[in-house]
Image (tube, rainbow, N blue to C red):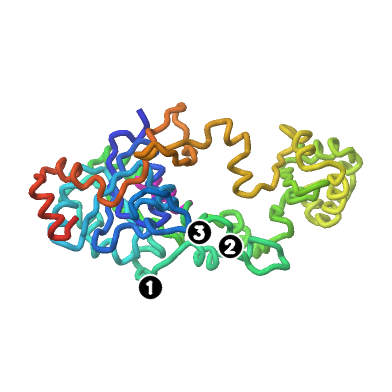
Amino acid sequence: MLPLSGVRVIAVEQYGAGPFGTLFLANLGAEVIKIEDVSHGGDVSRSVGPYFLQGEESDNHSLFFQGLNHNKRSLSLNLTTEEGQKILHKLVETADGLTDNLRGDVPEKLGITYPALEQVNPAIVCAHLTAFGRSGERATWPGYDYPMQAEAGYFKLTGEPSGPPARCGLSLVDLSTGVAMALGLVSGILNARKTGKGRDIDVSLFDNALYNLNYVAMWQLNAGHNQQRPPRSAHFSLTPCQLYRTKDDWIYLMCNKEKFWTELCKIIGRCELITDPRFLTFKSRLKNRDQLTEILDIALAGKTTDEWLEVFSGRVPSAPIYDVEQALTNPFVTENGRIQSIYRKNGEEIKILKPPIHCDNELPEFKQAPEMGQDNYNILSELGYSAADIKQLKSNGVI
């Protein structure tokens, strides 16, 4: 029994951040019913390329969409219609939570806030993921990951000092905000089950991007330090902790404890560095980082990256520098179940990543992302609609 088995979540979601958050919920056992606006062709990510499954319906062949929406159900529903609102209310009566990731002024317009739904289900928890919040001067602004990274300082912390400002390689603001939304929703549901009263919970891309600055923000706010990007993807204060050259490639070392620094010096045969006044402490090593980089580059040039990784294994935190393909074909990934499979109707395989939250080795039953409206009949039948009713709803453009 997965932890969220029996929890029903209505997800008025699209694209990346919201669906990533509810994917965590689905993989923990929650029933996630994805609401898609039939009048606009559903979730826009259904058409996001450039890679697609062959032989699928055109609304369900995007690998981008599959990655974010497997293990969910789909109800195509026009919430701007009176009948669409009636269906929503019937569904809310049966649900624990509702999530959305829409522009800040849209949830209220669609009637998916707690004040709008409290009379329908006093215990419903509504979690809203917006760009800048549902109030204030930017409530009506659209917003996406990369501009958030730019305004929250990430670009000036990423890349080489001599290069142009650079974003993080992944959409980390979207992904982390989705997880924050999921945590907020589950926390609200836990409280509602004790008190019988739900609430609105809000998280925004901007607030989450800013919150992720964490210790870097603490340094600036309290010590006046304006952190800039160091060379070779180095840690802002710990040394050695960066890229180093080997005989054939690069390696990343992270000596974030003094014992690792001592062990590193012993392994590379440079024990005199342990007592060298330039490198006695983190502070002195940071001051003399350029000199230390030259020394370590020379020492590490004697072996290949793979040879060093074997020597450092379990003794000094170290890692190879992989591209995406190398990361996914790494034996530590492939031989330990970190890649799972979904099987399509025709028996062909879709490979997916194993969820990172492990529950006593219990996994969900992995199911392909749904076609738009795939679950209309079953969900509406559960809510008391007859086959004739459902046919009429479709004819009227409600579903």
Q: Quadrant of the N terminus?
A: top left
Describe the element under mark 1 as helix, strand or loop: loop
Circle 1: is it few (<14), some (14-19), or many (20+) Cα within 10 Å? Answer: few
Residue 234 appears in the figure = yes
Given the image, on which type of amino acid does mark 1 rest?
Glu
* Precedes in sequence: disc 1 or disc 3: 1
Q: Nearer the viewer, residue 41 or 71?
A: 41
* Precedes in sequence: disc 1 or disc 2: 1
Mark 1 vs 2: CB contact within 8 A: no
| Residue 259, placed above or below residue 137 | above
Percent position of residue 62, x then y: 41, 53
Given the image, on which type of amino acid does mark 3 rest?
Ala
Residue drawn 15% across the image and 48% down it: 90
| Residue bearing the label numbered 3 | 209
Q: Which residues are magenta?
A: 176-185
Percent position of residue 247, x then y: 83, 46
| Residue 196, placed above or below residue 140 | above
Question: What's the CA distance linking mark 2 and mark 3?
Answer: 12 Å
| Residue bearing the label numbered 2 | 167
| Residue 293, placed above or below residue 131 | above
Percent position of residue 125, x then y: 28, 48
